[in-house]
């Protein structure tokens, strides 16, 4: 049976995301608190007998409590370790073993971990659904579901919405899941990073190359705080390196900024201090373009979002936090097939399989993930993780770590049988999935030669000429 896991926002297609929203709306209508309509106030019993376990290796308030509340509101029970110091991780147990064991105790596991790609590793070892509650700086897909649901409840259609994302765009996992979803639903993305905290190059590459985002030239918009502005092409044929000439119509910049999404400096991920960190306060929002904006923040805030805004009609961040319960109720319900009308457990398409060729080799046997915070570099997981990469068929081709999704844009591919390596790899002459096991990947020619491989004949000739 195909199990569904949610390790990235891209594990759900747009229809499935809409299904989560429709079910969350239904739960909210049915169970809302009479005095606070955005809050779930009563419970139901469709999850009677089901258990959710939370395995949190990093601090959390909202995510863990709202997941546990969601399961209890559905009629189920919640168990878990909120503090890694009191779980077996403190004794040196691997995540792989922990999830294998916890699969015996619960029907669904929510994991938060400081390493990028941890949820994906957990999904390889669990035989119940894994939900990513935030893995390092990689992704936080359920936060994005809350964010999009909030915008929808505020009557903000995602298509052509102008969304500014501000703060630590480099380290905020919430931002990474959010911008992929914005692009997929056709919103325009305005990047307003703190200095040195720009969107990571691999996320930026995916927005431009896989989600049809096009950069609007800087001189065409008037906003000093904005680092880049992306519009999402409506049709694949609009693909071009720059935004189409009629971008002003597409972006409707004059209509102003519909959403400002604020994030805190992720101090736990950086050794340096946040510099000139952007602050959103009444003064910032004075400009006419922010008149009708909605201010979102995944919280916690630590000074970048002024508390004086809390009573401003544009502030929606506490409602956004409240929606964490109905959204997570809907997600659990779909994953566990609790609702007779909707369910994903035996979903025909199963886990959304990648169509990219997957290379799989032992760690230490060739190229390794270049992200030092990737779960594959965690000593505890050494015996459980492998060097696994998807081939991204761009020119030049790229490798994407199966776990943390960081891309490598320069590498060597060698044939185990002929003992030769290619020097000019092009995506066109890569092996298909069946033949992928006959090949090994190296970081560079030196590494390939150290392992006993020689350049392919034709290349040697070219070199001699
Ligand atoms: C976020 C997280 O953990 O990434 N918090 C949350 O789940 N709402 C945001 C943050 O910690 O900055």
Image: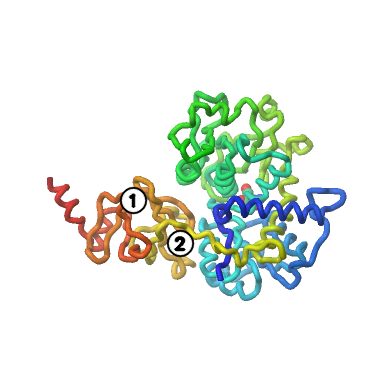
Q: Residue furthest right?
A: 34
Q: Give the residue at mark 2.
A: 376
Disc 1 or disc 2, which is closer to the eye?
Answer: 1
Q: Are marks 1 and 2 in contact (CB under 8 Å)?
A: no
Q: How is the image coloured?
A: rainbow
Asked which secondary structure carries label 2, the reply is helix
Q: Quadrant of the N terminus?
A: bottom right
Callout 2: CB less than 8 Å from ligand 1:
no
Indicate the quadrant where residue 301 lies: top right
Q: Nearer the viewer, residue 23 or 272?
A: 23
Within 10 Å of the Cα at label 2, are there few (<14), some (14-19), or many (20+) other Cα atoms?
many
The numbered dot on residue 427 is: 1
In the rendered view, does 96 fall on the left or right side of 304? left
In the picture shown, does residue 164 fall above or below 375? above
In the rendered view, does 252 fall on the left or right side of 271? right
Picture mark count: 2
Whether residue 365 is visible here, answered yes or no, is no
C-alpha distance separating marks 1 and 2 = 25 Å
The residue lying at 32 percent from left, 62 percent from top is 440
Within 10 Å of the Cα at label 1, are there few (<14), some (14-19), or many (20+) other Cα atoms?
some
Asked which secondary structure carries label 1, the reply is helix
Whether residue 144 is visible here, answered yes or no, is yes
């Amino acid at each position: 049976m195909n199990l569904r896991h949610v390790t990235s926002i891209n594990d759900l297609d747009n229809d499935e995301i809409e299904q989560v929203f429709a079910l969350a709306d239904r739960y909210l209508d049915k169970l809302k608190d009479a005095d606070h309509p955005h809050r779930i106030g009563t419970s139901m019993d469709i999850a009677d007998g089901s258990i959710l376990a939370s395995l949190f290796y990093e601090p959390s308030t909202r995510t863990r409590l709202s997941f546990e509340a969601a399961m209890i509101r559905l009629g189920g029970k919640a168990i878990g370790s909120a503090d890694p110091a009191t779980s077996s991780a403190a004794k040196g147990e691997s995540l792989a073993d922990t999830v294998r064991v916890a699969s015996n105790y619960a029907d669904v596991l929510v994991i938060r971990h400081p390493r990028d790609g941890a949820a994906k590793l957990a999904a390889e070892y669990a035989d119940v659904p894994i939900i990513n509650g935030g893995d390092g700086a990689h992704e936080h897909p359920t936060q994005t579901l809350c964010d999009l649901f909030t915008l929808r409840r505020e009557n903000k259609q995602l298509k052509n919405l102008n969304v500014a994302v501000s703060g630590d765009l480099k380290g905020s996992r919430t931002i990474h899941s959010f911008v992929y979803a914005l692009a997929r639903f056709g919103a325009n993305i305005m990047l307003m990073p703190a200095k040195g905290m720009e969107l990571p190059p691999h996320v930026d590459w995916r927005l431009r190359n896989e989600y049809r985002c096009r950069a609007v030239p800087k001189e065409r918009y008037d906003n000093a705080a904005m680092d880049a502005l992306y519009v999402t092409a409506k049709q694949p044929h609009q693909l071009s390196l720059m935004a189409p000439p009629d971008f002003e119509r597409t972006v409707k910049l004059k209509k102003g900024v519909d959403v400002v999404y604020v994030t805190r400096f992720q101090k736990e991920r950086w050794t340096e201090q946040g510099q000139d960190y952007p602050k959103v306060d009444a003064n910032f929002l004075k400009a006419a373009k922010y008149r009708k904006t909605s201010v979102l923040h995944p919280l916690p805030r630590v000074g970048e979002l002024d508390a004086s805004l809390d009573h401003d009609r544009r502030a929606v961040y506490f409602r956004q936090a409240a929606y964490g319960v109905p959204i997570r109720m809907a997600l659990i319900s779909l994953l566990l097939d609790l609702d007779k009308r909707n369910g994903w457990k035996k979903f025909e398409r199963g886990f959304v399989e990648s169509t990219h060729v997957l290379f799989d080799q032992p760690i230490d046997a060739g190229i390794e993930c270049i992200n030092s915070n990737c779960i594959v570099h965690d000593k505890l997981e050494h015996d459980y993780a492998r060097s696994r990469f998807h081939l991204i068929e761009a020119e030049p081709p790229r490798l994407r770590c199966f776990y943390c999704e960081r891309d490598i844009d320069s590498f060597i591919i060698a044939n185990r049988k002929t003992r030769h390596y290619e020097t000019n790899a092009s995506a066109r002459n890569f092996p298909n999935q069946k033949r992928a096991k006959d090949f090994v990947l190296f970081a560079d020619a030196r590494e390939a030669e150290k392992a006993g491989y020689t350049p392919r004949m034709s290349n040697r000739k070219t070199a001699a000429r």
